[in-house]
Amino acid sequence: MIESKLSDDQRILVISIKGIFDFSMLGEFREAYSGDIDKSVKVIIDMRDTLSINSSALGMLLNMQRSLGKEDGEIEIINCNETVQKVFNITHFNKKFLV
Amino acid sequence: MNDYKILVVDDIPTNRLMVSKLLNRVEGYSVVEAVDGENAVSMYEEEDPDLILMDINMPKMDGMVSTKAIKDMAGDEYIPIIFVTALTRESSLWNALESGGDDFVTKPFDPEVLKSKIHAHLRIRDLNRQLLDNNSKLSTMNQNLVHEQDLIEHFFNSALELSYLDEKYINYHMSSMSTFNGDVLFVSRSPKGGLYVIMGDFTGHGLTAAMGTIPVAMIFFKMVSKGIAVSDIAREINHQLYKMLPTSMFFAATLMELNTQGDVVTVWKGGMPESYWLGTDGELKGIIKSSHMPIGILRDEDFDDSTEIFSVEENDKFYLCSDGVTEACTVDDEMFGDERLHYVLISNSSNRIEKVLTELAIFKGSKEQNDDLTLVELSCHEVPASEPVAESMPGKRFDLPWKMQVSLTSSDMRDTDPVEQLSEALGSLPALERHKGIIAVLLSEIYYNTLDYSILSLDGIEKNNEEEFSDYYKLREERLNKLDGASIDFEFEFLPDSQQLLIEIRDNGKGYQGHSPILNDDELHGRGLTIISSLCENAQFSEDGRTLTLTYSL
């Protein structure tokens, strides 16, 4: 399940991901950052309830980065568990996102 | 009507007889007699009379000495003593009253005067008894109150000890807890990193208000230890308080989370005065107003758990206060108010809490110090995780070998999420508990590769941008809906000797051997095999890519 919250001043978008982050969440995930959102918004992905992540989800993250026109390290990923951290390390995602 | 016992003291039998006869005729009176002063003292002890008529001149012990003895014995209890005497000299009467007597009648006396004096003194005695009784009830109640206050204080001290009050992050002022005013402050650091603060104000005072804080503390500390989001904590506290509290009671509160990196603050705020956010140069960065009703009023379905999020910098500060600060009044009932608070905060660069307290004292002036307020300062810094990385349980091996097979049909692929179900099932086995996350990663990789590429033949379809992604998704749905006769079989085998898990996935599709390895970090896809080979001891395709066997070391 994915929840997204835009702060009242429209400056921060927090996307929380619950469960296994994979292809089955594609639609939900894209919805979370589409719509009426300013490109300058700071994006934070909260993974406190993310059990694990697979490679298609990594693709989805990159896709988001691209479509919002964000630089490497601009999108922040917080509260990762050990497993998720491991996958980010293996795939060098910690260079593209601030984990 | 009360039954009163009257002690008649006289050494002359005819006198005693006369008075006794007179009083025995009055309804509700009974008479006992004593023959001299000494006898009077012992009769007082034995008979516990309600009133004493005392002669003055008697052998052995005269009436005055006897009166003094009896009054001493009675202590706080009022035992009226009326002298019946032939003495008329003023000095003698004065001496009689000095010795402790309450009144006198002179012989020969008018029976009606004597009876009305007795009646009046008995009424005073009744009042006195009631007073003593009330006093003793009051003192019991007071003891209970002191006991309750001790309990409240004990509870809050324990909760404060649980709180993480490192000065680096938290500075605060709180009213003394012995007469609980309804203000609550708990701070907790999550083992997963991040600092949580709950500051609030219960309606009411004393034990009733303190009762509500018990579930709040329990929920708060428990949920923070699991690193749960502020909105969920607010929702759970509301759920419990709504069930428990009477409708007239509720809990205004601010919940805050400072994240692990110390650069994001999340706030849920209901029914509390404004909070202030100040930068390192003392500049005002924001005012946080309540956007919700207090906790404990709304049903679950009406409760709004939305939070505000602030992107903060190192050493930014947040100031939270109870309504005791802004509503503090002068003698003329002028309130301190938000603006004064705001001004004091921005015009000082350090020790702002003390400054506010000083200003408040000056402002209130002669008004009695009514220290009924709470002030908290949160400083933003990194809050690293304190939980040690889970280490393998030493010496604990799981020795039973087992094998598990799962076969999926086309409709399973269409309608279910086998990755989640299998991860849950495998993760619940003792040997695999700690590997649940990694197993979910592996299953997710191999299942989607098999389904998308071998079964649905989507491997030639590009997905390099938004549109292609979306086309891919549509095509996938189409093919999945038309799917018939496909099968994907999983086989899991646990090898206790080598402490390894073998995972085999076999399908009846066209086979798939993986993409060519990715060349740069920007590729949107193709990382699956990299992840698999990094996490597993061994990964082996066979049967033209229709079977993949993974060896994962626990």
Image (spheres, coloured by chain):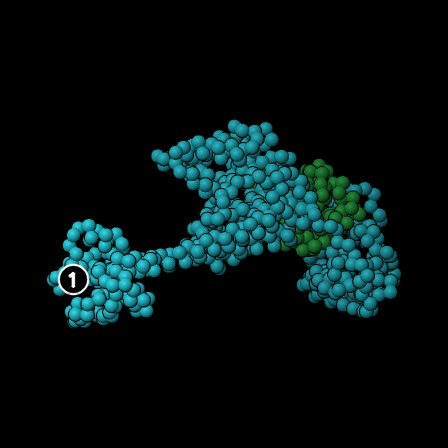
Whether A83 is drawn above or below B455: the answer is above
Task: State the residue in front, B277 or B306.
Answer: B277
Give the chain ID for the cyan colour.
Answer: B
Whether B361 is drawn above or below B530: the answer is above
Query: Percent from the top left, x then y, of residue B233?
Result: 57, 52
Query: Percent from the top left, x then y, of residue B337?
Result: 43, 35
From the image, state the color of chain A. Answer: green
Q: Residue at x 37, y 58 (%)?
A: B136
Pinpoint the chain carrying mark 1: B
Query: Is residue B125 in sight in this rendering?
Result: no
Q: Quadrant of residue B247?
A: bottom left
Q: Relative to B20, is B454 on the left or the right?
A: right
Q: Relative to B183, is A73 on the left or the right?
A: right
> Residue type at mark 1?
Leu
Q: Name the image quarter holding the N terminus of chain B.
A: bottom left
Q: Relative to B262, is B104 on the left or the right?
A: left
Q: Identify the secondary structure beneath mark 1.
A: helix
Task: State the residue in front, B76 or B333.
Answer: B76
Query: Percent from the top left, x then y, of residue B391?
Result: 77, 54
Query: Is residue B423 in sight in this rendering?
Result: yes
Q: Residue at x 74, y 48 (%)?
A: A85
Q: Residue at x 87, y 57 (%)?
A: B538
Q: Residue at x 83, y 43 (%)?
A: B519
User: Neighbour class for label 1 at 10 Å: few (<14), some, many (≥20)?
Assistant: some
Query: Percent from the top left, x then y, of residue B402?
Result: 81, 69
Whether B421 is drawn above or below B303: the answer is below
The residue that label 1 is drawn on is B114
Task: State the residue in front, B489 or B465.
Answer: B489
Task: State the residue in front, B89 or B362.
Answer: B89
